[in-house]
C-alpha cells in the first residue's frame, strides 16, 4: 500500500497525493460502517486499482493530530490569521475571536497584518504591541511593496496551514505574492460572468513552491463560540497562563473574583487591557448564548 495525504474530496472521491503521484480514490465501505468520514488533510494508506489511470482505494486513515469542523480539514498545524490595518478597519474583538477558535484546535498562530503601506496612523505598531505582549508573532506585510513576504514564506515552509480572516483583508493577494502557481488557480476570469472562476465550494489543499501546503478554504466559516464553555474560555487567552497567583486558583474566571492575579496584571500593564476587555466581551456572549437553549 501507498502512504499519502488527501488533498481534495468531492462527491465521494478523494484525491490522494503520494510519492508516485495523485490518485483518485474511493473509500472502503468499512469507514461508513464505523461512521468515519475521510477528511481533506488526512494521512491515509491506499491500494492501487489501476496504476495507468491512477485509481486507488483508501484502505486506512492514520490518527489525526488535529481536526477542524468548519472548515472540515484534518492535520492542520498552523493558522495564519490575516487582518488589514486599513480598508477594512481592523476590529480587534473579531481578531480575538479568530484566535480563540484557533487556540481551541491547538493550532500554532501567527498574525499577519496586511496593507501596511496604507498605514498613516501607526495602527500597525499599536496592534503589534498588543499581540506581541500576549505572546503571538505578528508580521506586517504589504503585497504592493512585498514587505516581509519572505517572512510569511518561512511560516509556510513544511507546514500545513489554514489562512483565516475577514473578507477584504487581502488573503488572496498575499497568496498570489507568495506563490505564482496560486495566482494561476485563482486568477482566471470568466468572460460570461466577469468574475473569478475559482470559487471555493469545498476544502482543498494546495502545494506551494516554498514547501508548504495551504488550505484553500474561506477559513473558519463559522465564528460562533457555541462549543466553548464559560469556564473554558480563559484557556484560549494564553497570556493568562503566565499568571498563577489568583486567590481561587484554577476556578477563577478572572472577572469579579477578589484577589485575581489576571486583573492585577492588567492594572500593572503586564496583560493588554484591550485583550482583557475582549475576553470579558466574549465571556458575556457565551453566557447569553447558553441562556437561549
Image (cartoon, grey):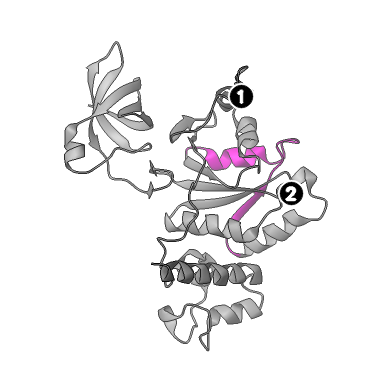
Q: How many neighbours does mark 2 have within 10 angstroms: few (below 14), some (14-19), or many (20 or more)?
A: some
Query: Image quarter for residue 55?
Result: top left
State yes or no: discs 2 and 1 in contact (Cβ < 8 Å): no
Q: Is residue 155 left or right of residue 232?
A: right
Tell me: residue 249, above or below residue 132.
below
Quick one: 283 or 215, which is closer to the camera? 283
Q: Disc 2 marks which residue?
A: 86
68 lies above or below 187: below
- For label 1, the crowd category at 10 Å Cα-Cα, with few meaning under 14, some 14 to 19 and many 20 or more, is some
Q: Return the residue found at the far front.
A: 292
Q: Was residue 135 drawn as part of the magenta stretch in this picture?
A: yes
Q: Nearer the viewer, residue 273 or 208?
A: 273
Q: Position of residue 84 (x, y in %)?
A: 68, 48
What x and y, as percent, mark residue 2? 26, 26
Question: What residue is shown at x 32% (from left), y 37% (from top)?
Answer: 43
Residue 187's disc is: 1
Q: Secondary structure at mark 1?
A: loop
Highlighted range, magenta = 134-158
Q: Mark 1 or mark 2, which is nearer the start of the sequence?
A: 2
Which quarter of the rendering shows the N terminus?
A: top left
Amino acid at each position: 500500500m501507498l502512504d499519502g495525504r488527501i488533498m481534495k474530496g468531492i462527491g465521494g472521491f478523494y484525491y490522494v497525493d503520494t510519492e508516485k503521484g495523485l490518485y483518485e480514490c474511493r473509500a472502503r465501505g468499512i469507514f461508513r460502517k464505523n461512521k468515519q468520514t475521510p477528511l481533506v488533510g488526512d494521512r491515509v494508506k491506499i491500494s492501487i486499482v489501476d496504476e495507468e489511470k491512477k485509481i486507488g482505494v483508501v484502505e486506512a486513515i492514520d490518527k489525526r493530530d488535529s481536526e477542524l469542523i468548519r472548515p472540515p480539514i484534518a492535520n492542520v498545524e498552523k493558522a495564519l490569521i490575516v487582518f488589514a490595518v486599513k480598508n477594512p478597519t481592523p476590529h480587534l474583538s473579531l481578531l480575538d475571536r479568530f484566535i480563540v477558535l484557533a487556540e481551541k484546535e491547538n493550532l500554532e498562530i501567527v498574525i499577519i497584518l496586511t496593507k501596511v503601506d496604507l498605514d498613516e496612523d501607526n495602527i500597525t505598531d499599536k496592534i503589534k504591541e498588543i499581540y506581541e505582549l500576549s505572546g503571538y508573532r505578528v508580521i506586517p506585510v504589504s503585497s504592493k511593496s512585498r514587505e516581509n513576504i519572505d517572512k510569511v514564506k518561512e511560516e509556510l515552509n513544511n507546514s500545513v496551514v489554514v489562512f483565516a480572516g475577514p473578507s477584504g483583508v487581502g488573503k488572496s493577494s498575499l497568496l498570489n505574492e507568495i506563490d505564482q502557481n496560486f495566482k494561476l488557480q485563482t486568477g482566471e476570469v470568466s468572460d460570461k460572468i466577469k468574475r473569478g472562476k475559482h470559487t471555493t465550494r469545498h476544502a482543498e489543499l494546495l502545494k506551494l513552491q516554498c514547501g508548504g501546503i495551504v488550505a484553500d478554504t474561506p477559513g473558519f466559516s463559522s465564528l460562533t463560540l457555541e462549543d466553548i464553555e464559560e469556564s473554558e474560555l480563559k484557556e484560549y487567552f494564553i497570556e493568562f497562563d503566565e499568571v498563577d497567583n489568583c486567590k481561587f486558583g484554577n476556578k477563577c474566571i478572572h472577572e469579579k473574583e477578589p484577589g485575581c492575579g489576571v486583573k492585577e496584571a492588567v492594572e500593572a500593564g503586564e496583560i493588554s487591557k484591550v485583550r482583557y476587555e475582549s475576553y470579558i466581551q466574549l465571556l458575556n456572549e457565551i453566557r447569553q448564548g447558553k441562556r437561549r437553549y
